[in-house]
Image: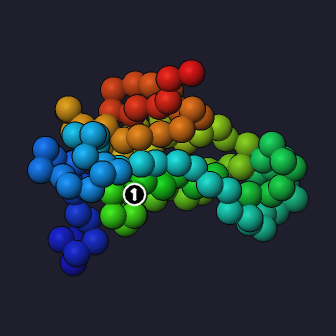
Amino acid sequence: MHSLFLVKPEPINEECVDWRWRHFQGCLGALDGTFIHVTVPNADKLRFRNRKGQITTNTLAACNSYMRFTYILPGWEGSAGDARVLRGAVNRPYGLKVPIGNYYLCDNGYANSQGFLTPYT
């Protein structure tokens, strides 16, 4: 069962012929956060209210170059920022691990750091 559900992401290699990915050697894929509407007790609504005023959970998801999910972390409060959710994912005992020399592409809600490449602005 373990080998069916826990598969290590494969980095883009030099033989890649897909024009969208061939310039990203070592890239494991892309990651981003999304808000999912939830129902929570009244006492927790403030923490789960996102910047748009909706009651949501902030979910981090990573996918590979074939658009297959390789990592999902649901459950963070809607008020939590993307960088905080990513930090929590990396610091978990069985959380998101990025091998040395590889990286994920991210949007500018995250910080440029070891294993995570964001746009230069």
For image coordinates 20% across by 32% down, the residue present is 101
Question: Is residue 12 visible in this depiction of the protein?
Answer: yes
Image position of 15 (left or right of 83) = left
How busy is the neighbourhood of tag 1: few (under 14 within 10 Å), some, or many (20 plus)? some
- Quarter of the picture holding the N terminus: bottom left
The percent position of residue 10, horizontal first and vertical second, equals: 20, 54
The percent position of residue 2, horizontal first and vertical second, equals: 21, 71
Image position of 114 (left or right of 106) = left
Which element type, helix, strand or loop, lies under badge 1?
strand
Q: Is residue 98 or residue 10 the one in the foreground?
A: 10
Most extreme residue toward the bottom, as rendered? 1
Callout count = 1
Q: Quadrant of residue 104?
A: top left
Say what amino acid the circle numbered 1 marks.
Answer: Cys
Q: Is residue 16 or residue 97 the one in the foreground?
A: 16
In the displayed structure, 25 sits above or below 40; it is above
The percent position of residue 74, horizontal first and vertical second, equals: 55, 58
Image position of 110 (left or right of 22) = right
Residue under pointer 1? 63
